[in-house]
Image (cartoon, helix red, strand yellow):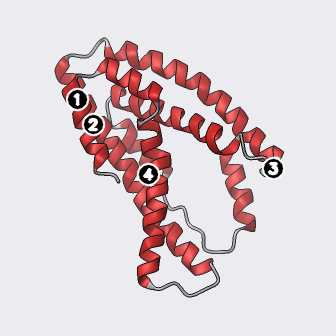
Amino acid sequence: MFRRIDAMIGEVLPDGYRFDIDPNAVAHAVLGKSTWAVLALTLDIELFTQLHYRQSIEPDSGLSDLFKDVFLYHWREESQHAILDELEWVRHDAELTAEERDRAVDEFIELVAAVDGILQAQAKADARYFVAKCGRTVDHAEGRMIEAAFLKAYRWQYIHSGAQHPHFGKVLSSLITESQGQHIQAALDTLQ
């Protein structure tokens, strides 16, 4: 469904927009990590997706009804997935040794860093596109500020809003030690 929407939007955007992330490469990187790390990232994504809908789409009366319906049904689907994935994450966690959980926490951090790499690449591409299409000359310094603003917004949306989601924090903290929590927070703090 989102690929169809993306194609429809692409038909009306000015030429030159790029989204070069290879979904197969992303899937390969994710699936190379432990189940615990993948479930942690999955729940994080499901929760920030729901938050995004509630904070920016649901209350916006200026959006088209069709657009809002697409995301409402996506929100409902993600709500169901979040419940199931949380249960699976907790169940899986109960089977881990302390050493396996330490490795899983490291892999979760690696996955978040990989997401950040995607966000950095997309922020660069989106800033270049914006500068090319905004209708005025943008000098190098302003272009860098635009790129930094894109990256800050993307990091909030795709990393921090999920990591700071109260329910994600509650589930995560119930599964990890204080030291592991500090390790995760230190890694997140580098992404400002």
Amino acid, disc 2: Ile
The percent coordinates of residue 136 (x first, y second) are: 61, 86
Mark 3 sits on what residue?
64
- For image coordinates 71% across by 50% down, the residue present is 4
Measured in 3D between alpha carbons, the distance from the residue under mark 4 to the one under mark 3, in whole angstroms, is: 26 Å
Mark 1 sits on what residue?
180
Q: Camera-side residue: 191 or 106?
A: 191
Mark 4 sits on what residue?
155
Q: CB of mark 2 within 8 Å of CB of mark 1?
A: yes
Measured in 3D between alpha carbons, the distance from the residue under mark 4 to the one under mark 1, in whole angstroms, is: 22 Å
- For image coordinates 65% across by 28% down, the residue present is 77
Amino acid, disc 1: Gln
Q: Residues within 10 Å of mark 4 (few under 14, many from 20)?
A: many
Question: In the picture shown, does residue 137 fall above or below 147?
Answer: below
Q: Earlier in the sequence, mark 2 or mark 4?
A: 4
Q: CB of mark 3 within 8 Å of CB of mark 1?
A: no
- Relative horizontal placement of residue 9, taking residue 153 as reference (left or right): right
